[in-house]
Amino acid sequence: MPAEALPSPGDAPGRAPGAEALPPGPSTIDLQERLQKLEQDIAKTQQLLHGPPRPPLPFPRNLLIGEMQSDVAMFSQDALNRAAVGDALNGVDFRRARLAAVGQLTEFNDYRLEMDFALPGRPQFLDVYLSQYALPAIANFRAGRFFEPFGMSRIVDNRFDVFMERPLLTVFAPARRTGCMAFGVAEDLSATWAASVYASADDFFGGNLTDVGGWAGAGRVTWLPYYDEPSGGRHYVHLGGAYSLSGVTNHQLQFSTTPELQLINGNNFVPIFLDTGAFAARQYQLIGTEFIWTAGPWSIQSECVAVPINMMGGPTATLWGTYVMGSYFLTGEHRPYDRTIGNLTRVIPFEDFFRARGTPRLRGGKGAWQVAARWSYLNFNGGDIRAGVLNDLTFGLNWYWNPFVRCYFNYVHAILDDPGRGTSQADAFGLRFQLDF
């Protein structure tokens, strides 16, 4: 019986000997080429129907941010102080509770829409503005409601301030007002400038309706004679000056202030220690100077404001205030400075505060610790105004858990010189927990 034919090397595997060979199928490379051609045909068809494909737009960019400050305050007064200003009640409150939408509409436009649900007004408009950048001649432009360019301690973001409250002299400085502002920064970032025109007074929602004295203007310049680039700005010197001229809405003007610790009672800050009462005036000026020296963890800061007032039916009255403060980071951080705005910005701890189970033992970080002291002086005696003088000595301890969470402790010793009752004293103790995002 003849032996079976063995398969030849050219036979396909598994094909019976002598069977007819099938034509080869398409290879993987052929299928890939056909798929790419099909995708190209689809893209050409879509382009004919809808035009060329558009890349995703980078704008607008929108972000929701917020802030919460929860305060505890306790007061102790001598009998004379209680007779002069009334009983300063202890309590707790939310000093600030804010939400804001911020973002960029184009490369040269940004905006901010911010409301506060703790301040008097509840809620109250805060920063509500639109900015346009890179304009000819005036550099940058802003319109809406915002801090007017006067006073370093007034316009610094409250989240970055050293103490729970701003110094006494900010009672004079214009806060947020509705208007417009041109502003810019030097190419080498050594100087900034700002000039604005705005309504001299407004309600909780930025409104100001009057036929009498409703307009004002303010300007500010800053200069960095020294800024240490190699250290990342751990050493610098800031100098600044500001001026404001304000018509008095309805010819009625009044200044009043609490010590450097306060609570909110309804639509009022309490306790009021100095109050000029309402008086008749046509206009008033603000003339301010600024200074900061920072050397690593050490920092010294000071401002002075003089307020000449054009009184109606009386001589010019000049009120004024000043403060000097110093601070030191026990953990070695420094007070960062933003050269584009000429002011202070967020502290970044070297390590965050945390506790976590590690190997072989519990591990963690201590955050940043800062001590600070400030003397503030406010004089409400000038011309026919005789409302008194207030000195505050404020001591602070700050614990930064991370860049966004912070705990404050403040002690304030207030010395009030009342023209009618003499000198009295009060002490205040404050604790705050703050977060922002």
Image: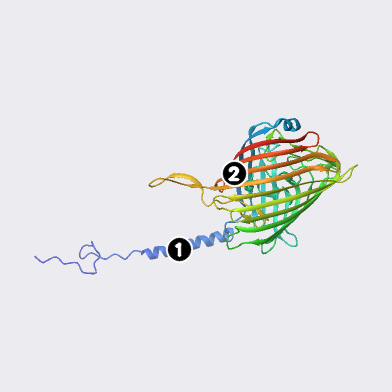
Marks 2 and 1, how far apart at CA: 67 Å
Query: Does 63 sit left or right of 119 as displayed?
Result: left
| Quadrant placement of the N terminus | bottom left
Residue 36: assigned label: 1
N-term mark: 2 or 1: 1
Which residue is at the far right? 313
Residue sitting at x 56%, y 53%: 333
Residue 99: where, in percent of width, then height?
A: 63, 42
Q: Nearer the viewer, residue 429 or 67?
A: 429
Residue 363 location (% of width, % of height):
44, 46
Q: Is residue 182 left or right of residue 49?
A: right
Q: Which mark is residue 397?
A: 2
160 shown above or below 30? above
Mark number displayed over residue 197: none
Residue 167 at what x, y percent from top left? 70, 45
* 398 in relation to 337, above or below: above
- Residue lying farthest left? 1
Displayed quadrant of residue 377: top right
Give the residue type that dot 2 points to.
Answer: Leu
How many discs appear? Answer: 2
Disc 2 element:
strand
Circle 1 SS class: helix
Q: Is residue 250 visible?
A: no
Q: Mark 2 or mark 1, which is nearer to you?
A: 2
